Image (cartoon, rainbow, N blue to C red):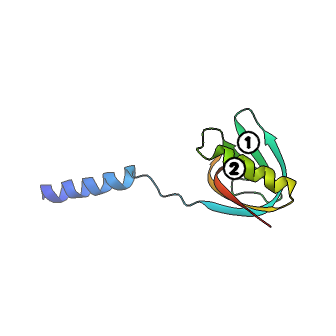
C-alpha cells in the first residue's frame, strides 16, 4: 500500500514539474521593414505571428544573432520571402529562434 502511494506521488510530481515541450511555429511572409531596437533586432513582416503582432524579435543574446540580422537585411533589401521560426512570446512580441530566406 505504501509502495503504491509513493509510486502515485512520484508520478504526480513528475507530471506537475515536468517542463512542457514547445514546438516552434513557422511563419512565412514578406519582410516589410527592419529595426535596430536597443535590446533586439526587429523584423516586421506582412504576416502576423501567433503572439499577435507583425514584429519578430531576434534577441542579441542568441548565438545566431548576426546571421539572423543578415537574413533580415537580405530579405528586406531583395524583397524576398522569409520563413521565421517563433520560439516563444513576450507579450505580443514574437521571439525568433532561426529563419530562412527564399526567392
Q: Position of residue 90 (x, y in %)?
A: 65, 44
Q: Could you tell me which residue is drawn at 81 percent across and 41 percent down?
A: 35
Q: Position of residue 34 (x, y in %)?
A: 82, 46
Residue on which disc 2 sits: 68
Is 78 on the left or on the right of 25, as rendered?
A: right
The crowding category of the residue bearing disc 2, from other C-alpha atoms within 10 Å (few below 14, some 14 to 19, many at least 20), is: many
Q: Could you tell me which residue is drawn at 60 percent across and 38 percent down?
A: 61
Residue on which disc 1 sits: 41
Do tag 1 and tag 2 residues touch (Cβ < 8 Å)?
yes
Q: Residue furthest bottom?
A: 103
Q: Residue furthest top?
A: 38
For the residue pair 74 and 86, the one nearer the viewer reads as 74
Find numbered disc 2 in the image and state the secondary structure of the residue it sits on. helix
- Say which quadrant the C terminus sits in: bottom right
Task: Please state which of the two labelled residues, at mark 1 or mark 2, is closer to the viewer.
Answer: 2
- Say which quadrant the N terminus sits in: bottom left
Q: Position of residue 96 (x, y in %)?
A: 65, 51
Can residue 10 be spotted in the picture? Answer: yes
Asked which quadrant contains residue 101, the reply is: bottom right
Q: Earlier in the sequence, mark 1 or mark 2?
A: 1
Q: Could you tell me which residue is drawn at 72 percent across and 57 percent down?
A: 49
Is 33 on the left or on the right of 102, as rendered?
A: right
Q: Position of residue 66 (x, y in %)?
A: 68, 44
For the residue pair 41 and 103, the one nearer the viewer reads as 103
Can residue 56 be spotted in the picture? Answer: no
In three-dimensional space, the C-alpha distance between marks 1 and 2, rounded to whole angstroms, equals 9 Å
Residue 40 lies, with reference to residue 44, above or below; the image says above
For the residue pair 20 and 97, the one nearer the viewer reads as 97
Find numbered disc 1 in the image and state the secondary structure of the residue it sits on. strand
Residue 34 lies, with reference to residue 2, above or below; the image says above
Asked which quadrant contains residue 12, the reply is: bottom left
Amino acid at each position: 500500500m505504501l509502495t503504491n502511494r509513493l509510486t502515485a506521488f512520484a508520478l504526480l510530481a513528475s507530471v506537475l514539474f515536468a517542463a512542457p515541450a514547445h514546438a516552434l511555429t513557422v511563419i512565412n511572409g514578406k519582410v516589410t521593414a527592419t529595426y535596430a531596437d536597443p535590446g533586439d533586432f526587429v523584423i516586421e513582416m506582412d504576416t502576423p505571428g501567433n503572439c499577435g503582432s507583425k514584429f519578430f524579435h531576434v534577441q542579441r543574446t542568441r548565438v545566431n544573432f548576426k546571421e539572423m540580422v543578415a537574413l533580415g537585411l537580405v530579405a528586406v533589401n531583395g524583397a524576398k520571402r522569409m520563413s521565421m521560426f517563433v520560439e516563444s512570446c513576450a507579450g505580443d512580441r514574437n521571439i525568433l529562434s532561426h529563419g530562412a530566406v527564399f526567392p
